[in-house]
Amino acid sequence: MAGLRIKGDWLLQYGLGLLCLGLVLAFALLHAVAPHVYVFFTRIPDGAGKWHPFVDLRAILQGGACWRQGVDVYAPSACLGGGTFNYSPLLLRAALLPIGPGDALAGGLLFCGAYAGALCLLPRPAHWREFWLRAAAAFSPAGYYALEQGNLDTLIFAAVVLVLRLGWHWRGWAYAVFALGAGAKFYPVALFALGLRESRRVFLRLSVAGLGLSLLALVLYGPGLVAAVSSIPSGTPFRASFGRIDLTRGLVMLHRLPHGTAQTCSWMLALGAVALAVWRRPLWARRLARLGVDEAGFLVAGAVVTILCFMAAQNIEYRAIFLLLALPGLVRFGRLLPWVVVLLLWEAVPRAMLSGLAQPYLPHPAAFGFWLLREGFWWWLVVEFLGLALAFAGTELQRLKLTLPGRTHK
């Protein structure tokens, strides 16, 4: 019996990673022997068929190759096929490495391996029901989309999971990884909220260092940063995206709101979400008190990344893989929110079945109803995450006032 228990525990911890590697091999086989079936799967997330994997990574490597040749990658150029580079200029410094578009296959497979490893490092599921719930989330269309595109979010996700799993004794590495992620794709800056768990002295040092590095980046790469932010893609809210603007922009496009009111109405919704979050804060404070430090770290990390991404910009759906950080903690507190996460990660399937969602507008009432349901679930999740974040910040700020400088919180 003890041997079976050990084997079961081992599979609970590492089974998702092994399953991920098996699925990667299966899709590689499909690409080789049944390319039309492979392309069918690639259409599910965003409606566009892709004959070859890892196109996002290839685009990054192409941008780096053009930059090495002296091309202004933030202006349309023939080197980028008439497009522009929409990532941080700090990421271009990686182009000094001897890599190019021809390395996209090796890099994409490395991303897949990193994602599989990250799934092994998440907190162990408490039972098999949780294991299969996580499997549904990890191997959802959103997770597949991130891997198939070879998107850098996959590598950032894996790195964040690694440093969180190493524990807070490795916090120097953690903040270095957060800084590198922020330099590459901006949104990982939200993870510095975990610095509130430090002593007052370390927290102040982190604040000063963060401010100094931000000013240095603006001085050295200001024009490039502005160009990168201004070129972040933003499009129809009816496809593979999530964000504060999607609901009101869609209603404007469907003539349900006056033209030109999308931003104003979306910020009004955001204020309403904050008000509801203040009401939910005491509940989340009690819940967080029941978690261990490491488990709470994963939950807070997933929440703050989701909040920043949702409120700041329209995001491609693959970025929702960061919900996997929060899922182990959410499972501890109830039945509904974990399933909301899974439904949001799988929304591409009903969206693909309701073909109107692949168009700029929603011609069918069923498609419109589904889209409203999707947006409602996103706002519900963000309200809960805001309440969680407020509870976390309030508790830790109160502790920082009581902690003597130099004393480490444990």
Image (cartoon, grey):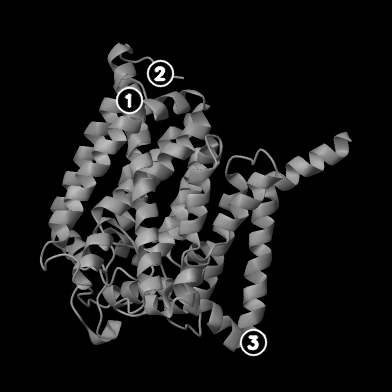
Where is residue 395? Give x, y as percent.
35, 22
Where is residue 184? Give x, y as percent.
33, 57
Q: Which of marks 2 and 3 is in front?
A: 3
In the rendered image, the quadrant that contains the N terminus is: top right
User: Which residue is found at the position 38% from the left and 79% from the top?
Assistant: 356
The residue where tag 1 is placed is 202
**Is 228 above or below relative to 363?**
above
Where is residue 196? Give x, y as percent.
34, 28
User: Which residue is found at the position 36% from the left and 62% from the top?
Assistant: 94
Q: Earlier in the sequence, mark 3 or mark 1?
A: 3
> Is there a contact, CB below 8 Å, between mark 1 and mark 2?
yes
Secondary structure under the numbered disc 1 in the rendered image: helix
Any part of residue 146 in sight: yes
Asked if residue 102 lies left or right of residue 402, the reply is right
Where is residue 54? Give x, y as percent.
47, 74
User: Which residue is found at the position 50% from the left and 57% from the top?
Assistant: 343
**Amino acid on which the number 1 mark rests in the picture:** Val
Secondary structure under the numbered disc 2 in the rendered image: loop
* Residue density around tag 3, few if under 14, some if 14–19, many if 20 or more, within 10 Å: few
The residue where tag 3 is placed is 34
Secondary structure under the numbered disc 3 in the rendered image: loop
The Cα–Cα distance between marks 2 and 3, rounded to whole angstroms, is 57 Å
**Amino acid on which the number 2 mark rests in the picture:** Thr
Q: Earlier in the sequence, mark 1 or mark 2?
A: 1
> Is there a contact, CB below 8 Å, between mark 3 and mark 1?
no
